[in-house]
Amino acid sequence: MLDFQYHNATRFIFGKGQECLAGQYIKEYGAKKVMVLHYGTGLEFENALHGRVLASLSQAGLSYVDFTGIERAQIEIADRAAELARQEQVDFLLPVGGGAVIDVAKYVSVAANYGGDVWEDFYINQKKPLPDPVMLGAISTVVASGSENSPESVIGKGTLKRTMSDLKIRPLFAIINPELTYTLPPKLTAAGAADIMAHAHERYFSPTPDNYFTDELNEAILRTIIKFTPVAMREPCNYNARAQMLWAGLLAHNGQFEVGRETDRAVHCIESEIGGMYHSVHGIGCGCVTMAWAKFMCRRDIPKFTTYFHRVWGVEMDMLDPENMLREGIRRMVDFYTSIGIPSDFAELGVREADVPTLISTTRLTPEGLVGGYSRLTREDLAHLYRIGFGKEDAKI
């Protein structure tokens, strides 16, 4: 285990009806004027939630300004929001939604008081230190992104998606009411599950040895999502299933389950390019890429993958025939993902084979010129992984 420091300033406010107290919580931080950011779908559920949030701000004596129309976390939308925040001189940001809305709010929190180019300086060049941001909280309405308590913001520009990471943009509080996820379409519930699992995988599969306790925590996240996702999809209003998934999702991506180890991030690096080019649903892409990644990687580290398939997927331990364990583990993994609607073929995801060289060329690399701290994929490896994902190459397991 490596030495580490861990700090999480986000206050978790978990339970029924807590969004109705948002104004009260914001007032505790001394704010005067709030910008509320949301999707603006016009759906009855969002309108009702929006009304409750605005009522809570009024009851707390807070002024507010509304920013709507966040379909995706794209630079054009984020810049418009930042300009409005500057004009209105807001001192608190309250995104209400999923990862796209919260990530835009994080961009705004920096851009509102910054005279330079936020995209170039902090998303592309990872400039440090980050200027002091506008305060922000978050109300999460989806299961998965973890953006409501992470120090990261992912924004797209053209066909690229890039990340800004700094503890300063971790929200001051995160309101999580499982009831707010009841109306999620099954596709987005599945996407959330796959994203959570990708977050856990990328902490679990690490080149750092001797992390037994942290391994156990990530295995618990994975087993929880495998158990409760089908329940939430069958019974959308099952409060316990939604609550279990939300809590697992929060812990999978707030840094707590990666301490003392190097992380991987290969799946997210690959999906980032796919999502940037095709604007596909992030979690769906993560699940599809995960299956191809596991098929490609499992023979490289048989001890780790046999342990993983045994502890997470319930494959019987058989060290006399570990390759059979790999095959059975992959089968169970693929069966689960496809059963919740995640495509196992890149073509079903919308990827065009002709675009693969471009996707590979823009994939972010480590300082050693590889993809992933554990995976350590070369560009040639990526080409094999894509062929596996298209069903054009046998994974040989």
Image: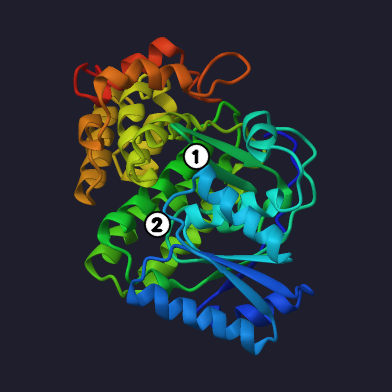
Closer mark to the observer between disc 2 and disc 1: 1
| Residue 289 appearing in the image | yes
Q: Element type at marker 1? A: strand
- Residue 268 circle label: none
Point 74% across, 51% down: residue: 168
Q: Is residue 213 left or right of residue 388?
A: right
Point 70% across, 86% down: residue: 61
Which circle's residue, 2 or 1, is located before the other in the chain? 1
Q: Element type at marker 2? A: helix
- Dividing the picture into quadrants, the one containing residue 186 is bottom left
**Where's the C terminus, which quadrant?**
top left
Decide which of 58, 7 is in the foreground and name it: 58
Q: Which residue is mark 2?
A: 224
Q: Which residue is mark 1?
A: 156
Instruction: Name the spot of residue 235 as percent of width and height, x first.
Output: 25, 71
Judged from this view, the residue extending furthest toward the front is: 87
Query: Alpha-carbon neighbours of circle 2 within 10 Å: few (<14), some, or many (≥20)?
Result: many
The amino acid at mark 2 is Thr
Q: Is residue 246 above or below residue 59?
A: above
Q: Is residue 345 above or below residue 315?
A: above
Query: Alpha-carbon neighbours of circle 1 within 10 Å: few (<14), some, or many (≥20)?
Result: many
Instruction: Name the spot of residue 174 as percent of width and height, x first.
Output: 60, 66
Label 2, label 1: how far apart the Cα atoms are: 31 Å
Decide which of 218, 116 is in the foreground and name it: 116
| Residue 18 appearing in the image | no
